[in-house]
Amino acid sequence: MSRAFILLLDSFGLGALPDADKYGDTGANTLGHIAEWAAKEGKPLSLPNLEAIGLGAAAHKASGEWPAGFGKREGFSGAWSVACEQSTGKDTQSGHWEIAGVPVRFDWGYFPKTVPSFPKELTDKLQEITGVAGWLGNCHASGTTIINELGDEHVKTGKVILYTSADSVMQIAAHEEHFGLERLYEVCEAAYELVKPYNIGRVIARPFTGENGNYKRTSNRHDYAVPPIAPTLLDHVKDAGGDVIALGKISDIFAGQGVTQLIKGADNMALFDRLLEVADTAADKSLTFVNFVDFDMHFGHRRDVAGYANALHELDARLPEFTAKLKEGDLVVITADHGCDPTWPGSDHTREHIPMLFFGPAAPAQELPVADTFSDIGATLAKHLGVKPLSNGTALL
């Protein structure tokens, strides 16, 4: 039996890439700086399960430094290393697509860090088509922050909250009850068509609930994304007759392309619960791909170091539940799509190495070379599952 699992810790970088200076990210190190902060606070990171696979050694390979508090130096149980990014950005789509064998070697379109961020002709046309009362925000912002800042005005006026980030994205937020979820989706569908000339990767519907300045985004998020420009690992597995099980936002990132089953989850731990269920039922030759989004959405972008550290502890503590469900022939990789150093200035992603921590019955314990593309991950899983080789990447196992 051969199954494959990708556990993607969204934004979990291990140290700046050689070209990080082009992005203003020289010195960024998501794990390293979290570990340093935790040690200074007298609450050192304790990730024994990740450390046993080779996380500390991978971080050392990326940055030349061992994360504070990591003492294990040998005898790792996994096949470990790090990967460099060929794609030109440091965004979500590029990272995921490259892992799956399709590096993004072109430049996405981005909206500037001005106020307003979006061209007037774009917002005017979108208002004309959708009939919304107007726009709030129209800037670069953290989504969890801007809905609390502008939620009351949105509810009072019916104007929609519009914002962007370092990703190639337009994000549109509205109250599920006062504005309506389906109406929000309709606005986003119209926006997706209008942003095509700007070469924007995604329009994201960001529904929320709550009242009086206390608002919370819901799991009814939906991404309207440009589909991958070439077949990915997901397509190769599906075309070979295997199931591709997408947990969390994975299906949206790939525009549903290559996905056979979609499973939602409200947060990291809910997604981990779903992962455990899938581990019991996933068939031979299946690929399960889960994105633990809270690391990025709630802690990286919000520069919440303590929250990020706690989320790492939570996931590490539950890993034995997952490994206990693995079957003979299973191969798992823990990785990321970019960095988002919570100690770094601003609120954007950071250009970093990503971990490659292969484990499970089919993963021999060994040090792997530094991958010159994230696609080596997908190529390794394609070989393991016996599907058509990817057009990019080299199998490492």
Image (spheres, rainbow, N blue to C red):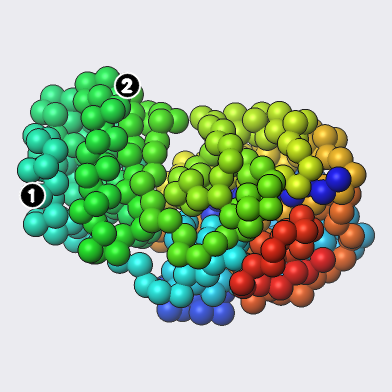
Residue found at the far right of this picture: 75
Q: Residue at x 14, y 29 (%)?
A: 158
As drawn, is 285 to the left or to the right of 300? Answer: right
33 lies above or below 305 = below
Q: Residue at x 7, y 43 (%)?
A: 128
Residue 15 in the image: state x and y as whole percent: 60, 67
- Element assignment for label 2: strand
Between disc 1 and disc 2, whose residue precedes? 1
Front-lying residue, 242 or 320:
242
Residue 233 in the image: state x and y as whole percent: 62, 58
Dot 2 alpha-carbon crowd within 10 angstroms: few under 14, some 14 to 19, many 20 or more: some
Q: What residue is shown with label 1?
A: 124
Front-lying residue, 373 or 350:
373
Can residue 144 be seen from the camera position used here? Answer: no
Dot 1 alpha-carbon crowd within 10 angstroms: few under 14, some 14 to 19, many 20 or more: few
Residue 110 in the image: state x and y as whole percent: 29, 64
175 lies above or below 76 = above
Type of residue at label 2? Gly
Q: Residue at x 21, y 25 (%)?
A: 179
Can residue 124 be seen from the camera position used here? Answer: yes
Q: Quadrant of the N terminus?
A: top right
Mark 1 to mark 2: distance in Å? Answer: 28 Å
Answer with the quarter of the image where residue 173 lies.
top left
352 lies above or below 220 = below
Type of residue at label 1? Asp
Q: Quadrant of the C terminus?
A: bottom right
Q: What residue is shown with label 2?
A: 210
Q: Residue at x 76, y 75 (%)?
A: 369
- Element assignment for label 1: helix
Answer with the quarter of the image where residue 32 lies.
bottom right
Residue 232 in the image: state x and y as whole percent: 57, 60
Front-lying residue, 362 or 170:
362
